[in-house]
Amino acid sequence: MMGLRVPCLVAAALLYQTPWLAITIAALSIPLPWMAVLIANDRPAQKRRRMAPITINPERALPAGNREIVDAGTDPDPR
């Protein structure tokens, strides 16, 4: 549908000698993007999937790191 909009506008430009036909074709091409989005989004909602409970394997878990806090301190040469 989106591919029809540009050819419709080109056809309307080529038919400028018959204004009523050019305006009709141009007016029909205006709602095409909106209709394409409606059709693309028209599907049933996805069902909610249940996740299996997570079990933690302590043998594969990362070791607890040290909690050393590094302080930034003050800059001796502030510029």
Image (cartoon, grey):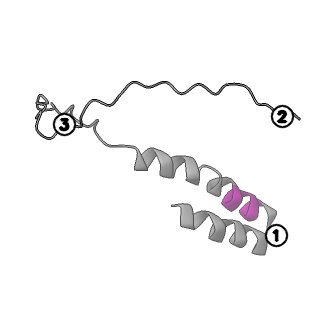
- Examine the residues drawn in magenta and state their main secondary structure: helix
Within 10 angstroms of label 1, few (less than 14), some, or many (20 or more) residues?
A: few
Q: Residue at x 64, y 71 (%)?
A: 7
Give the residue number, with chain letter if any, for mark 2: 77
28 and 54: which is toward the camera: 54
Q: Is mark 1 on a helix, strand or loop?
A: loop
Residue 25 counted in the magenta span = yes
Q: Is residue 33 left or right of residue 13?
A: left
Q: Quadrant of the C terminus?
A: top right
Amino acid type, label 1:
Tyr
C-alpha gap between disc 3 and disc 2:
43 Å
Give the residue number, with chain letter if any, for mark 1: 16
Which range of residues does the magenta coloring cover?
20-26
Q: Residue at x 57, y 66 (%)?
A: 4
Residue 1 vs 11, above or below: the answer is above
Determine the residue located farthest toward the right in the rendered image: 79
Task: Place residue 59 in its image quadrant.
Answer: top left
Within 10 angstroms of label 2, few (less than 14), some, or many (20 or more) residues?
A: few
Q: Earlier along the polypeptide chain: callout 3 or callout 2? A: 3
Q: Residue at x 60, y 49 (%)?
A: 31
Residue 43 vs 71, above or below: the answer is below
Give the residue number, with chain letter if any, for mark 3: 61
Q: What element carries label 3?
A: loop
Name the spot of residue 45 as percent of width and height, x first: 29, 35
Q: Earlier along the polypeptide chain: callout 1 or callout 3? A: 1
Q: Earlier along the polypeptide chain: callout 2 or callout 1? A: 1
Name the spot of residue 55 as percent of width and height, x first: 10, 30
C-alpha gap between disc 2 and disc 1:
73 Å
